[in-house]
Image (cartoon, grey):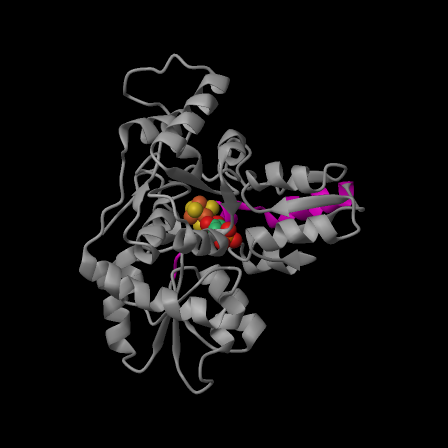
Amino acid sequence: MYTSILPHKKSEVAPITLDKTGLKEEIARLKKEKNACILAHYYQEADIQDVADYLGDSLYLAKVAEQVTSDVIVFAGVHFMAETAKIINPSKRIWLPDLNAGCSLADSCPPEALSALKAQHPEALVVTYINCTAEIKALSDLVCTSSNAVAVINSIDPEREIIFAPDRNLGRYLIQQTGRPMILWEGACVVHEAFAFEKIVKLFQEHPDAQFIAHPESESAVLDLAKYIGSTSGLLDYVQNDSAQKYIVGTEVGIIHEMKKRAPHKTFIPAPVQDDTCACSECAYMKVNTLEKLYRCLRDEAPEIFLSEDLIARARKPIQRMLEIA
Ligand code: 13P
Ligand code: SF4
């Protein structure tokens, strides 16, 4: 099982003398030389988003990974995303700037524990959020992302019992949206669970013209305050097309970089977190990737994602079913 270590940003290897412009130039040169493309998630730091060939949410990036023609995918995201790219397109080499780019949701769900839960409910269909390891996907009947989760659950025979893992908050939201009871795994995202209900209410009072929008990994009480709930791509489309001018953003702050590009005249306020002393609305796992590590990764052709053929074959089935549904 892959377990992430809560990351630190400092690199222990020899320092790079290139400045930001130099790094970007070298990244572009190496990408061409090695026939690589860069896929990045909206939670990556702004400079990484800016050098990406494809920027998107988990579903979009999985679909891109399936279709790219380059020999190499450099995945500027977290480990489960890079693994998903390898599962979907095993002939490609997949490089991840830092293997410590994990996810608290993926860490919350070890395969032995999910197998034990499955054994208690032998008739249940196992649906897992894409934020999980390849081993967990291999134990699943269906995978979903926050973009297609409602459609995936609605596609299941209404008589069938469902186990949903690993995100209890997304699970509760899906129960509410679909009316389907589900057995929920007790995992949570450290970033989305950090949002502070009372502080959001207070912020609303200070900005009565603002709308609160949130990712469904947030707790139910926080979601109850939201005018719109959606995946990262859903949130971006919403702020671009909606008529309000100010938003309190209930997801990882990295997304605000793209929000400002899509709606430059609007104001985006990061949703407040419980602990004022931490940068908790930043995903420490996503932010372990840096422009420098992206450069090193292209230069050194490492770290690389390796998965056994057997695991790839088993983990691919539920992902393929998802892609056929949604
Ligand atoms: P999206 O699929 O909505 O981009 O979410 C990914 C994620 O990790 C949210 O925390
Ligand atoms: Fe995982 Fe949360 Fe980070 Fe998304 S924001 S990668 S769910 S820890």
Q: Residue at x 32, y 31 (%)?
A: 297
Residue 190 in view, yes or no: no
Q: Which residues are magenta?
A: 186-206
Q: Is residue 175 left or right of residue 197?
A: left
Q: Is residue 195 magenta?
A: yes
Q: Position of residue 83 (x, y in %)?
A: 32, 50
Q: Nearer the viewer, residue 306 or 244?
A: 306
Q: Is residue 149 left or right of residue 109?
A: right
Q: Is residue 230 left or right of residue 286?
A: right
Classify 230 as above or below 49: below
Q: What secondary structure is the magenta-colored segment mainly?
A: helix
Q: Position of residue 273 (x, y in %)?
A: 56, 41
Classify 51 as above or below 306: above
Classify 322 as above or below 56: below
The part of the image, by quadrant, that contains residue 99 is top left
Q: Residue at x 28, y 51 (%)?
A: 91
Q: Position of residue 121 (x, y in %)?
A: 30, 78
Q: Nearer the viewer, residue 112 or 46?
A: 46
Q: Is residue 236 magenta?
A: no
